[in-house]
Image (cartoon, rainbow, N blue to C red):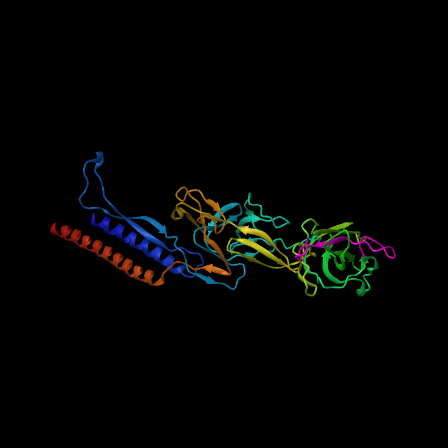
C-alpha cells in the first residue's frame, strides 16, 4: 500500500508543479487567470460496502481551479486595447464558435472587423447609418469607414437682443446691399441635401409701434447666398416674418417665435428647401443689438478620422466635419460559475454545463463591469507566491519519493529473511 500512496503523491506533486509552471509561464499573458491545484484523499471500501480501511491509499488530483479575480489594469499604446473593470467577459466568435475572453488586445483586420490576436471576431451591437444601435442582434463588430452622409439644415436657432433704442426705419426701403436700410443682420452657414454649404443672412428692421398695434415691432428679411428670399428686386421687399415685443422687452407670447424660410436650389439638391428659424428667447432691451447664441442642425459629408470606446462599450466615430456618431457597442457576458468555464487556448474560454448559460449585457449595466479603453488587464499570476508554492510542491515530491524508497527497503528486508 505504501507504494500506491507514494506513487499517488508523486503524481499529485508533479501535477501541482505543472499547474505552477503554467501560471509562471503566463505571468505576462494579458487576461490570464492563475490556476490552483485542488487535492482529495483516497480511501478504499470493501465489496458490499462493509467498512473502510483506517489508512487511506493516497491522494488524487481533484480539480485544477482557475480563480477569476480582477487583474491589474495598465495603460496600453494600442488604441484598440480594452480592459474589463469588474464582472464580465468579451464575447468572441471564432469561425462560428462562441468563446469568451478577458484579453482585450484587439486590432482591426483588413476588412475593418475588430479581432483578437488569434483572429477571433469581437461581438457586439452594430449601428445603422444614423448611429442607432441594433440591440436586438449580437454580431461581429466591423468599423464602418464610409463617409458620413450630409444632413440638410431644417432648423436654425437664434437668440438675439435687438436694441430698443435703435432708429425706426421703413421696411419698404429695405435693401440688403444698403446697411442704412436695416437695423441689424446676422449670418449662418446652412447645408442642402448634398452637403453644400450656403449663407443664410437675416436682416432686422425696427418698425417701432405701428398703430393700431401697441407693441414695438421688427420685420425680418432674409437672403440666401445674397439672393432675397420671398421677393425679387425691383419688386417691393417682403419680410419673412415679424416680431412683436412686450413692454418688458420679451417676445409677445401671441406671436410665433418660429419663422419659416423657403428657397429653391438648382444644383440637384432637394428643392425647395424649407428651414425654420426659431427665435425663442430673443429680447428687445436698451443695449446694442447682438447675437447671444446661433446654431443649426445640418452638416456636410465627413470622413471618419478616429474612433474611441467609452466605459459603456459604445464605439464612437469622429468625422472630419466635426460630427460624432455611434458605430457599435461592445457586449459582455457573465456566468453564474465562471470557474466552470473550459479553457480553449488563445486566452479564450468556452461555456460548459458547470459554468451555466452566458448572461448577455452591456458594460456598466447591472452587475456588468465597465470597459476601459487604451488599457489591458494583466495576468493574475503572483510570481512570489508561485515560487513559494513551487518549493513546497518540490518538497512534497521528494517526501513521497522517500516513502517509496522506505517501502522498497522494507520489502527487501522481508525478502532477505528467507535467505
Magenta-drawn segment: 228-251
Task: Please state if 223 lies on the left or on the right of 59 as rendered.
Answer: right
Instruction: Kindly identify the residue that appears in the image at 46 percent across and 54 percent down.
Output: 102
Q: Would residue 297 be found to the left or right of residue 226 on screen?
A: left
Residue 419 makes an appearance in the image: no
Q: Is residue 236 above or below residue 43?
A: below
44 and 154: which one is in front? 154
Q: Is residue 185 above or below residue 365?
A: below
Q: Quadrant of residue 323?
A: bottom right
Q: Is residue 231 magenta?
A: yes
Front-lying residue, 173 or 68: 173
Which residue is outermost to the top? 48
Q: Position of residue 265 (x, y in %)?
A: 80, 53
Q: Based on the displayed image, in which of its 4 quarters is residue 228 positioned?
A: bottom right
Count of marks, rendered view: 0
Nearer to us in this view, 116 or 232? 232
Amino acid at each position: 500500500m505504501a507504494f500506491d500512496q507514494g506513487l499517488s503523491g508523486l503524481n499529485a506533486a508533479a501535477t501541482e508543479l505543472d499547474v505552477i509552471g503554467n501560471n509562471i509561464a503566463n505571468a505576462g499573458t494579458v487576461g490570464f487567470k492563475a490556476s490552483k491545484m485542488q487535492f482529495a484523499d483516497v480511501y478504499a471500501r470493501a465489496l458490499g460496502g462493509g467498512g473502510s480501511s483506517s489508512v487511506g491509499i493516497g491522494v488524487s488530483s481533484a480539480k485544477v481551479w482557475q480563480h477569476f479575480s480582477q487583474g491589474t489594469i495598465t495603460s496600453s499604446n494600442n488604441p484598440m486595447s480594452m480592459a474589463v473593470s469588474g464582472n464580465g467577459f468579451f464575447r468572441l466568435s471564432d469561425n462560428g464558435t462562441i468563446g469568451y475572453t478577458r484579453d482585450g488586445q484587439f486590432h482591426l483586420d483588413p476588412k475593418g472587423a475588430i479581432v483578437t490576436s488569434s483572429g477571433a471576431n469581437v461581438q457586439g451591437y452594430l449601428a445603422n447609418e444614423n448611429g442607432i444601435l441594433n440591440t436586438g442582434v449580437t454580431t461581429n463588430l466591423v468599423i464602418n469607414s464610409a463617409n458620413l452622409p450630409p444632413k440638410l439644415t431644417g432648423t436654425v436657432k437664434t437668440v438675439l437682443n435687438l436694441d430698443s433704442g435703435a432708429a425706426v426705419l421703413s421696411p419698404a426701403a429695405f435693401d440688403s446691399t444698403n446697411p442704412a436700410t436695416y437695423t441689424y443682420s446676422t449670418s449662418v452657414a446652412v447645408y442642402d441635401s448634398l452637403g453644400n454649404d450656403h449663407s443664410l443672412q437675416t436682416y432686422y428692421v425696427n418698425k417701432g409701434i405701428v398703430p393700431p398695434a401697441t407693441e414695438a415691432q421688427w420685420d425680418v428679411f432674409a437672403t440666401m447666398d445674397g439672393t432675397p428670399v420671398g421677393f425679387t428686386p425691383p419688386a417691393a421687399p417682403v419680410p419673412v416674418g415679424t416680431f412683436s415685443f412686450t413692454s418688458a422687452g420679451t417676445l409677445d407670447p401671441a406671436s410665433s417665435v418660429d419663422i419659416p424660410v423657403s428657397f429653391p436650389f438648382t444644383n440637384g439638391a432637394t428643392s425647395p428647401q424649407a428651414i425654420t428659424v426659431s427665435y425663442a428667447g430673443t429680447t428687445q432691451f436698451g443695449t446694442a443689438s447682438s447675437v447671444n447664441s446661433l446654431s443649426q442642425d445640418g452638416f456636410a459629408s465627413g470622413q471618419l478620422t478616429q474612433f474611441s470606446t467609452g466605459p459603456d462599450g459604445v464605439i464612437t466615430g469622429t468625422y472630419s466635419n466635426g460630427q460624432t456618431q455611434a458605430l457599435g457597442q461592445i457586449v459582455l457576458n457573465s456566468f453564474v460559475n465562471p470557474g466552470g468555464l473550459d479553457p480553449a487556448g488563445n486566452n479564450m474560454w468556452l461555456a460548459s454545463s458547470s459554468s451555466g448559460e452566458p448572461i448577455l449585457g452591456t458594460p456598466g449595466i447591472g452587475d456588468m463591469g465597465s470597459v476601459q479603453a487604451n488599457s489591458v488587464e494583466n495576468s493574475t499570476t503572483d510570481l512570489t507566491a508561485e515560487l513559494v508554492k513551487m518549493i513546497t510542491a518540490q518538497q512534497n515530491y521528494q517526501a513521497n519519493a522517500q516513502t517509496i524508497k522506505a517501502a522498497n527497503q522494507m520489502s527487501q528486508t522481508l525478502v532477505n529473511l528467507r535467505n
